[in-house]
Amino acid sequence: MTSYRLPTGGLVDRTAPLSFTFDGKALSGLAGDSLASALLANGVRLVGRSFKYHRPRGILTAGASEPNALVTVGTGGRSEPNSRATMQELYAGLVATSQNRWPSLDLDIGALNGLLWPFLGAGFYYKTFMWPGALWEKLYEPFIRKAAGLGRATYESDPDQYEKQWAHCDLLVVGAGPAGLSAALAAGRAGARVIVADEQAHAGGALLSETATIGGASAPCFAAAMVAELQSLPNVQLLTRATVFGWYDDMVFGAVERVQKHVAAPQAHRPMERLWRIVARRALLATGAEERPLVFGGNDTPGVMMAGAARTYLNRYGIAAGRKAAIFTTNDSGYALARDLEAAGVELAAIVDSRRQRPSDYRGKARLISGAIVTDARGGKSLSSIRVSHDGRTEDISVDLLAMSGGFNPVINLACHRGGRPVWSDAQGAFLAPESLAGLALAGAANAVTGIAACLADGAEAGARLAAELGFAAAPDSTPSVEDDIIAAPTAPLWSVPGSKVKAFVDFQNDVHVKDLGLAVREGYGHVELAKRYTTMGMATDQGKLSNVNAIGLLAQVRGVSPGEVGTTTFRPFYTPVSFAALAGAHHGRHFQPVRKSPMHDWAKARGATFVETGLWYRPAWFPQPGETHWRTSVDREVRNVRANVGLCDMSTLGKIEICGSDAAAFLDRVYCNPFLKLPVGKARYGLMLREDGMVYDDGTTSRIAEDRFFMTTTTAYAAGVMNHLEFCSQALWPELDMRLASATDQWAQLAVAGPKARAVLSQIVDDDISDAAFPFLAAGEVSLCGSALRGRLFRISFSGELAYELAVPAGFGPAIADAIMAAGEAHGICAYGAEALAVLRIEKGHVTHNEINGTVVPSDLGLGRMVSAKKPDFIGRAMLAREGLQAPGRAQLVGVVPLDKADAFRSGAHILAAGAETTLENDQGYITSSCFSPHVGSSIGLALVRNGAARHGEEIVIWNGLRGEITRGRLCAPVFVDPEGGRLHG
Amino acid sequence: MASLITCPHCGARPKEEFTVKSAALPRPSADAGEAVWFDHVYLRDNPRGAYEEYWHHTSGCRRWLVVSRNTATHEVADARDASEARP
C-alpha cells in the first residue's frame, strides 16, 4: 500500500512518525494527524459498515459531523466505541477497531441486508415483525439489535479520572475560526473577560485548511498570530479540544474538554475529560457552516467525500484523498478545492457543476462540465467511477475520489437549544438562527457570511458590539487584505438528482435513502417530526448534522412546499455525544455514594463486628463470638444478654439537633404533636412529629438541657429531612421565634447501655449520682465522667424496654469511653450488641420505627393517640389530623403477631388475612411491618398494621406470603411482648 | 428550570445546591377550617407564568428562600430570604 501523503505541505510534523493499528494492522501516521487523516494517508478507504445495510463506508468529512468513520478507540477499560475517526487525534500506539461487521470489515455477512433492501425500507420492522407480539422480546429485537449496530461498550471500568468545573466570563466565543478569533480579539483587547472554546486541537478553524493569503501571511500563520495575541491577554482564556455542547437557562453553556484523549500515556493526576459549565454574560456563536452532501446514487461509496473535507486533508494534512479526482458542486466552493488539488499536482478529471453558468474566474486545466449532475458513483468498497449526466447524455468517468459540495448549512444548533426555531432563508438557501436571541449572537459563516475577509470583519464587529453592550469600549480593527480567497456565494439547493440507479443516501449513519422519505410522505408521515421517527433520519449519534437539511428539502420537494414550511425537528443538547464519565465527573463509586462512619466504627470493627449498610451509614449488625457460625446465634445471645445482664450499643447514627433560644420550647411545642412547652430542665421526652397532612413524620427523644437549650434526636434515616423541615419551620413559618438550630449529629458519639445491670456498670463511669432517686426514668443532663476527666450528656431513655441509659460524649472520646464501659462491665457480663439485636429488642417492646411510620399512619394508628395534645392551639399537622377519616373505624392499627405453632416463622411484608379466608389480595387486612425471632417469647414475633387491629387482640389469623407461597397460622396480640407494665424501665 | 439561582446571601449559585419544596403559600391559621386546610395541603395552581416557590439552599447557607420564577420562560425574577418575604 503506497502512501497518499504528498511530499510537502500540511501542518503535520514529518519528523515525528507515529505508529498505530487499525483492525490489528500496523500503520504509520504523523504528529498532527487525525486518525482519519492517518488512515487516508495509508490508503485505508473502507473504515466501517453502515448501520442497517452493512454497506462499506469510508471517511466523508474532516470534522464533528462524521457519520461513517466510527471506530472503537483504545482497549480494555479505556476503549471508547463510536469514536469519530475525524475527531480523534493520532497518538503513538493508538489502537482502532472497526465496528458493526462480522467476521471482518472486508467480508461482512451482514452486507446481505443490502441485497434484501427492497424489503428493508423505512418502517420495515414495524410492518414485518408485528405478530406474534411475544416474539418481540425473545426473537425480533435481539436479532435486529445484533444485525444493526454500533460499537460495543466495554464491561471493564474506566481507569481514568474526570472532573467538572465552573467558569464565568463576559463573553463566550464558540468556535475559533476567523470570525471567532477576531471577535475574541476585539472584546479581549477592550478588557472583557473572554473564553474562546474550539473543538479542534488547534485554534484557527477553516483558516487551517485555507490557501488564501491574509495580510501577507499564509492563512494558518495569520491564525497563529491571532492565537498568540489572544494568549498574551490575561483576560482571555482559550480552550481547545473543547466542544460547547449546549446552551442552557441563565446563559449557562456546557462544554466538554478532551484533556487527554490525544495522549499515548495519560497522566494519572490529570483528568481524561473535563466538563465545563460556563456562565457568560454574552455569547457569540462563530461555529461556521457545515457543507451539505449531494444526494445521488452510491453517494456513500468510500472515495466520495465532502469537498471541504478533501481540501482539509490536502491543505492541513498534506494528503491527496485520491489519485484521480472529480468534483461535483453546486457552488464555487468546489473551485477552491479544484485550484488546490491542481496546485498540489493531483489529477483532476472533471468538475461537474450543476449550474449552467460557468464561473468566469476558473483558470484550471480540469475539464469543466456545466449544467451537469453525477447520477451514480460505483465501486463498492472503493470508488472506481462516476456516471455524469449532462444535456441528455450520460458518460462514465473513472476516478477514485469524488468531492461533493451542495452548499452550506450554518451551524446554528446551540442557538436553538432554548426553544428558538430556525428560519428558512430562500436567499441563502439555508436555515438561519432564530432572530432576537437574548444575550447570544452569531458571526461569520454561522451567520451566513461568506468569505474570509467578511468573516473576519463580521467577527470583529460582533466582538466589539457585545463588549460595548457590557460597557467595554471596543472598536473593531481594520480588516487585513485577503488574497486568493474563493468566495462561495449561496446558490439554489439541489436536493436530489434524477436518474440514479442505486440507493442515494440522505442520512448516512442511519441508512436512510431518498425512497424512504418518499415512502414516509406516501404513508402519511410527511410531517418532519413523523418522518424523522418513521425513517429514523437524524436519529443517529450524529443527529443528522449532514442529513437533516437535505431530508427537509426532499420532504418539501415531495410535498410541493418550501423547506420553511416543512420546518426543522427540535435541536437539543448535546451537540455531539458526551461521555457518561464526563457527565459524572468525580461522582463515581464511593464518591457518588460515600461511606458514613460512626465515630465508633473502628472500635466496632476491632471487636469483629459484621456491618450492615443503612443508607450511607455502616452500622455494626452483630458481634460474632468465637464458635458462632450463624448470625442468629450471635443476635440471640446479644438479645438474651441485654435482657439478663447488660449490653452496649452504638447509637451515634441517630440525628442530633441542638435547639436554643428563648423561644426554643415554643418552637418544639409547634413541631411536635405532643406538648414540650413545660418540659422541665433535666428531663427527656419522647416526641412525635407530624406532617402537615396529619400523618406521622418522625419520632425521637428531645431533652431540655437548660431553660433555653434542647437536644433533639431523630431517626437515622430522617436526620437530614428533619433538619430541613425544622429549618423551614423556623425560617419560613415562624421567623419571629427567637431560636436557632444546629445539626450536631457528627459532634457526638452516643452509646446505649441497656440491661438490668446498666446502672451498676455506668455508676463506675459517671461521677454524678445516677441512683433511681437522683436520676429516674426520663432524666437527662450533663454529667461528669471518669473522675472529672470528661463531660458528657446522660439520658435515661430506653429503646429495649430495659433499664437503660444513653451516654453522649464528644465524638472523638467515643471509643475511649466505650472501652471504659466494657471494662467496668466485664464483671457484669456486658457485651456489645449490634443493629440486629437492637431491632429484636425494640420489636419485643413494641417500639415503632419507619417500618411502621410508613407515611399513612396517624398517631392513633400506632396506639399513640393519647400523646396528641388537645390543648395546644396549633402544631404542624393539627388541622388535618382532625379529619374524620383519620379517626374513623376500619383503619389499620398496630398489633403484635405470633404464630400458633412456635416452630413456625413468617416474614415482614406478609399479608394478614382473616382465618379461613381465601388467599387473595381482596381479602388482605394488613401486613407484617417488622418481624424477628424473639428469644424472650421463644418464637417468631411480628408487628403488623391490621384493620381494626387494636380491637382484635387474641383473634386467630392467617399470615400469607404470596411471593414465597408461605401460609402461617397466627394470632393477633398486644404489640408489647416484654414487660407490658414497664417495670424494668423504672428499675 | 433555571440553571442559576441568585441566593440573597451567597450570590448566583448552581441550582444543584438548592432543593425545591413547593409553592410559597401562607400557612393557614389553625382554625381556618377544613376546606382552607385541604386547599393548602393538597391543591396547587399550575400557572403559566409567574410562580413563587420555597427553595432551600441545602448545600449552601441552608436558608429557605422564596424564589419567583416564570414557569414558561424559566426566568428567575427574584429570590428573597423566606423570613423577610412571607407570602
Image (cartoon, coloured by chain):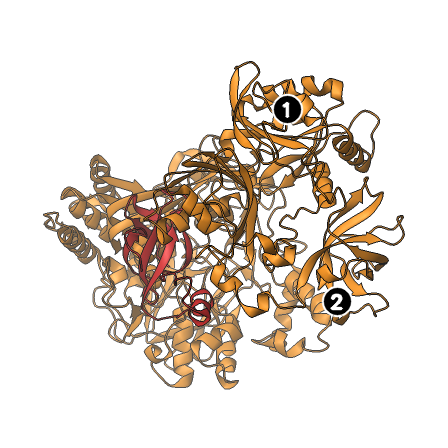
Chain colours: A orange, B red
Circle 1 sits in a helix, a strand or a loop, which is it?
helix
- Return the disc, 1 or 2, that comes first in the chain's sequence: 1
- Identify whether A620 is placed above or below B10: above
Label 1 resides on the chain identified as: A
Quadrant in the rendering for residue A662: top left
Q: Amino acid at mark 1?
A: Trp
- Return the residue at label 1: A603
Report the residue at 75% width, 67% height from top: A924
Residue A214 position, x and y percent, is 18, 48
Report the residue at 23% width, 45% height from top: A194
Question: Depth check: A165 or A987 in front?
Answer: A987
Q: Nearer the viewer, mark 1 or mark 2?
A: 2
| Outermost residue, front side | A773
Any part of residue A957 in sight = yes
Left or right of residue A455, residue A271 in this image: right
- Identify whether A106 is placed above or below A434: above
Residue B80 position, x and y percent, is 28, 52
Any part of residue A345 in sight = no
The numbered disc on residue A924 is 2
Question: Depth check: A29 or A696 in front?
Answer: A696
Quadrant in the rendering for residue B23: bottom left
Q: Which quadrant of the rendered structure holds the C terminus of chain A?
A: top right
Mark 2 Cα-neighbour bin, 10 Å: few <14, some 14–19, many ≥20: some
Residue A533 position, x and y percent, is 51, 73
The numbered disc on residue A896 is none
In three-dimensional space, the C-alpha distance between marks 1 and 2, rounded to whole angstroms, equals 46 Å
Left or right of residue A854, residue A345 in this image: left
